[in-house]
Amino acid sequence: MTRFVDLAQEIYDGQPVYHTHQKTVMWTDTSHADTEYLFGKEINGKPPFTFESKAILMCDHGPTHVDALAHFRPGGDYVNEMPLSQFYTPGKAIDVSHRKPGEYIIVEDLEKACSEAKVEVNPGDTLLIRTGHYDETYPTRKYAENYPGLNEAATRWIVDRGVVNFGVDSPSPDTPVDLTYPCHAVCKETDTPHTENLRNIDQVVGEEFTYVAFPLAIREGTGSPIRPVAILED
């Protein structure tokens, strides 16, 4: 039996996002009442159907999204230039939720989490890291204010295992108290993309799954909203 775990946060007006990014704004562009009035005037007051549409204003890093290489390295690939194979991979997931907001996730945390979950991170994998921050704070303002982050050594530990992507259930894999952005800096150096604002990672910790999270084909996009899904075969 195939099981799907939705790893994406909802997109909605006023959702909490990273503090430097465009806020998500949504509004009704055309309502059923609008089209009923317009179509009714054209065909004797009896419109055959009505419709409604929404308009969305958001950053390419607003909701659940992947960071393209161009986001943190001038000259890096834009999101529409990245291979789709990078978003269809074996998936692994671990839990480091003992770390508190502002604390570093270190190599020992990752190794212990892998051991506890009986997970081996292999080349070509996508690694999902549950900090517990989403479950503890979303959708309050605290979600975007402070959270744990990977230090440089922990990020290198992930990259050295040959992952093609990794992701967290928080606005960034860097803690906001460290403005040197050690995780992003290693990603810049090694051309490693990562994914932010995930949820439901707890449902796949220690499981074997396929990770599917295709980005939008945004021309010169520095990132893209995605709908990441873990596919499990029970």
Image (tube, grey):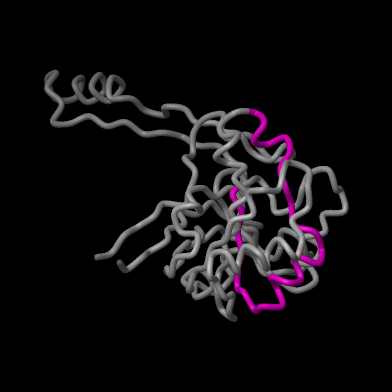
What residue appears at the point 12 percent right and 20 percent down from the top-left corner?
Answer: 44
Q: Quadrant of the N terminus?
A: bottom left
**Residue 226 at x, y = what percent?**
50, 54
- Magenta stretch contains residue 186: no
What residue appears at the point 32 percent right and 68 percent down from the top-left corner?
Answer: 233
- Nearer-the-camera pick, 48 or 59: 59
**Residue 132 at x, y = what percent?**
59, 45
**Residue 173 at x, y = what percent?**
70, 54
- Magenta stretch contains residue 155: yes
**Residue 138 at x, y = what percent?**
57, 34
Which residues are drawn in magenta? 141-169
- Nearer-the-camera pick, 180 or 61: 180
Classify residue 192 by image quadrant: bottom right
Classify residue 222 by image quadrant: bottom right
- Residue 154 appears left or right of 225: right
- Residue 208 appears left or right of 193: left
What residue appears at the point 53 percent right and 70 percent down from the top-left corner?
Answer: 118
- Residue 32 appears left or right of 104: left
| Residue 16 versus residue 128 in the image, above or below | above
- Nearer-the-camera pick, 73 or 186: 186
